[in-house]
Image: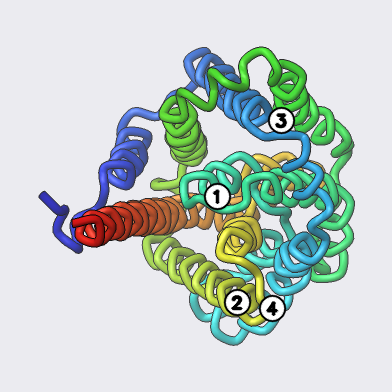
Amino acid sequence: MARPKFIPDNFTLCLIGAVILASLFPVHGQAATAFNWLTNFAVGLLFFLHGAKLSREAIIAGATHWRLHLVVLASTFVVFPLLGLALKPVLSPLVTPALYAGVLFLCTLPSTVQSSIAFTSIARGNVPAAVCSASASSLIGIFVTPALVSLLITNQAASGGSAWHTIWNIVLQLLVPFIAGQLLRPVIGRWIERNRGMLKFVDQGSILLVVFGAFSESVNEGLWHHIPISALAGIIVVSALLLALALGITIFTSKKLGFSRADQITIIFCGSKKSLAAGVPMAKVIFASSAVGAVVLPLMLFHQIQLMVCAALAQHWGARDMSGERDAHAGDESRAGGTKRTAAAVRR
């Protein structure tokens, strides 16, 4: 029986449940530390499985897809900051100056890595290109984001510390498991191909863990207690507007530039998303501690909205492609049956 058109799919319902659960029962203290380790393990397992699944030829093709990577990087580090500046007359009445600085900071951040790749996989996009593009965005953002902040936000206060630990976290959590999966591909590659359902479970499971953990952190920081309802509503409107514009621009640009459907999906997900995991530590380094809360609040809300919206898009596009493949397969079988019946009639 087909699901009614306006009823969310099971995965989207799980995402909503994760947000509600994190709002009511956020993890904190030792439980938060343990949950963080669990999330890191799930993300590492995701990259290990993708490393074991992807052929060397596919990875090389993804890494050399320079047109796609340029479009993603331009969307992340050029289009987003320009949108933040151009929308100031619209955004200023909705949010305070401190929160608008947070919106500009959001616009300078790199793309997400794990959720961009997971959504690309679910939507049946170009996963090798997504791995390369999202990872490159995170590494480049370590240097580009502080430079953009210094240009766009004139009242930021620098604090002590270094962002170089972010490089180590990316290497340890993402690249090392991916390389390990690649090295073990000759041993487990065929088993991974036979158990693709497990990879989908890890894709979706890692996203749910990221949603719950990120929202728990937001709630523990007083998300629902220390801001006026009007300011919260304004940030939600701003976040939705920015995401809608980014999605529209990446969809339009990727089509106009003649990319394949798989590449379009990769550009849309990698070019329209912002990283909470990279943004929070960068904010702690770039801004004074008293300013960090207001700066990261727009990012936290944008992060939740982008996960919900992109999850729905990924599920819809993935299901549509699978339906198309089934229809094509049924058509091939029908044509083959017609050919056999025609041949039998000729013989008679």
Residue pointed to by mark 1: 120
Q: Nearer the viewer, mark 3 or mark 1?
A: 1
| Residue occupying the point 74% across, 51% down | 133
Q: Residue at x 77, y 52 (%)?
A: 137
Q: Which residue is mark 4?
A: 257
Answer few, some or many: residues within 10 Å of disc 1's Cα (few below 14, many 20 plus, some between 14 and 19).
Answer: many
Label located before the other in sequence (3 or 4): 3
Query: Which quadrant of the figure has residue 208?
Result: top left
Q: CA distance from mark 3 to mark 4?
A: 30 Å
Query: Label 2 vs label 1: CA separation?
Result: 17 Å
Residue 1 percent location from the top left of the image: 10, 49
**Quarter of the figure with residue 231:** bottom left
Label 3 Cα neighbours within 10 Å, binned few <14 / some 14-19 / many ≥20: many
Instruction: Say whether marks 2 and 1 touch (CB < 8 Å).
Output: no
How far apart marks 1 and 4 lie (CA) works out to 19 Å
Q: CA distance from mark 3 to mark 2?
A: 30 Å
User: In the displayed structure, does residue 344 sit left or right of residue 142?
Assistant: left
| Comes first in the chain, label 2 or label 1 | 1
Q: Evaluate if marks 4 and 2 touch, with contact meaning CB atoms under 8 Å apart.
A: yes
Secondary structure, mark 2, is: helix
Helix, strand or loop at label 4? It is: loop
Q: Amino acid at mark 2?
A: Lys
Q: Earlier in the sequence, mark 3 or mark 2?
A: 3
Q: Residue at x 67, y 84 (%)?
A: 86
Give, as a three-letter code, the residue at label 3.
Answer: Leu
Q: Is residue 246 left or right of residue 330?
A: right
Res. 58 in view = yes
Q: Residue 256, percent across and down?
A: 64, 82
For the residues marked 3 and 1, what is the alpha-carbon distance in whole angstroms? 16 Å
Mark closer to the observer (3, 2): 2
